[in-house]
Image (cartoon, helix red, strand yellow):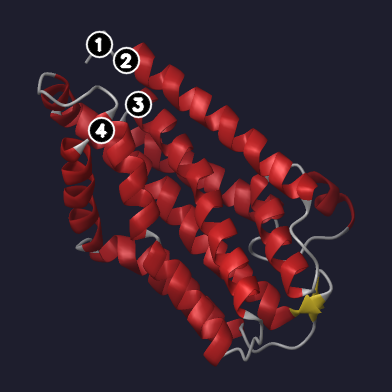
Amino acid sequence: MMGTLTLARLEMLRVLRNKRYLIFTAGLPAALYLALGRSHGTSYGVEFRAFYMVAMASMGAFSGALTGNAQRISQERKDGWVRQLRISALPASSYVIAKILASLVTLLPSLVLVLLLGRFYGGVQLPVPSWIIIAVSVWLGSMIFAALAVAIGYRFMPDTVQPMTMLIYLLMSVLGGVWFALGGTMQKIGQVLPTYQIVKIGTHVIGGGGVPGSAVAIIAAWLAAFVILAAVSVRSTVERI
């Protein structure tokens, strides 16, 4: 266990020193909120500035969990780092657990920064429990993409991983209503995606409601599916590593 935590800590330090990672996971969502966060109007029954806060917090968390993580895993497999860890005294699962733990920690700056901007720049007023629910739902929801990153990183080479993760991220973001609120047919499509449901939890709580059970069920289903996919991908490569 200590070896896994040490590996996770080293991964966190390495990621947080990556300027490109910080720009895209923390800088871009914050910049977009600064540009559009004070716009007037409503989305999903709440003020646009409140919806956009949840959306940009989600965007940074999802991007950090998926795009950079999958690329690093794939590159480390190619470079032989995963092979070296396999012949060490660490359990076989340590690498995957360390990656997911590091992902959950390193996306926190992006999440906290956008929520702070929502409160002090966008003027979003919420009781403390609502802030906690929003932060936790986005943070835990990012585990879906951390698991998917493991699955993709173990399956594909680095030159394939980057365009693949970007395409998945863009589809999940656009069709899931992260970039803009959905309506009509697009909203019906988006309702089956975890990105839409995570944003829905935030806007529902902001509007004074509780956490929708249907949203939790859909998010849990996607998480289970990607965890299974990640496990299958890792096991299928054991003999080749």
Q: Amino acid at mark 3?
A: Tyr
Residue depicted at x 44% and y 42%: 146
Q: Which residue is mark 4?
A: 95
Q: Which residue is mark 3?
A: 154
Tags 2 and 4 touching, CB below 8 Å = no
| Mark 3 residue crowding within 10 angstroms, few (<14) / some (14–19) / many (20+) | many
Tags 1 and 3 touching, CB below 8 Å = no
Q: Is residue 10 visible?
A: yes
Mark nearer the N terminus (1 vs 4) = 4
The answer to whether 42 is drawn above or below residue 6 in the figure is below
Q: Is residue 190 visible?
A: no
Tags 2 and 1 touching, CB below 8 Å = yes
Q: Quadrant of residue 58?
A: bottom right
The answer to whether 162 is drawn above or below residue 201 in the figure is above
Measuring from the top left, give residue 193's x and y in whole percent.
70, 44
Q: Which residue is mark 1?
A: 240
Mark toward the viewer: 2 or 4: 4
Tags 3 and 2 touching, CB below 8 Å = yes
Q: Which residue is mark 2?
A: 237
Residue depicted at x 44% and y 46%: 66
The answer to whether 6 is drawn above or below residue 86 in the figure is below
Q: Amino acid at mark 2?
A: Thr
Q: Amino acid at mark 4?
A: Tyr
For the N terminus, which image quadrant? top left
Mark nearer the N terminus (3 vs 2) = 3
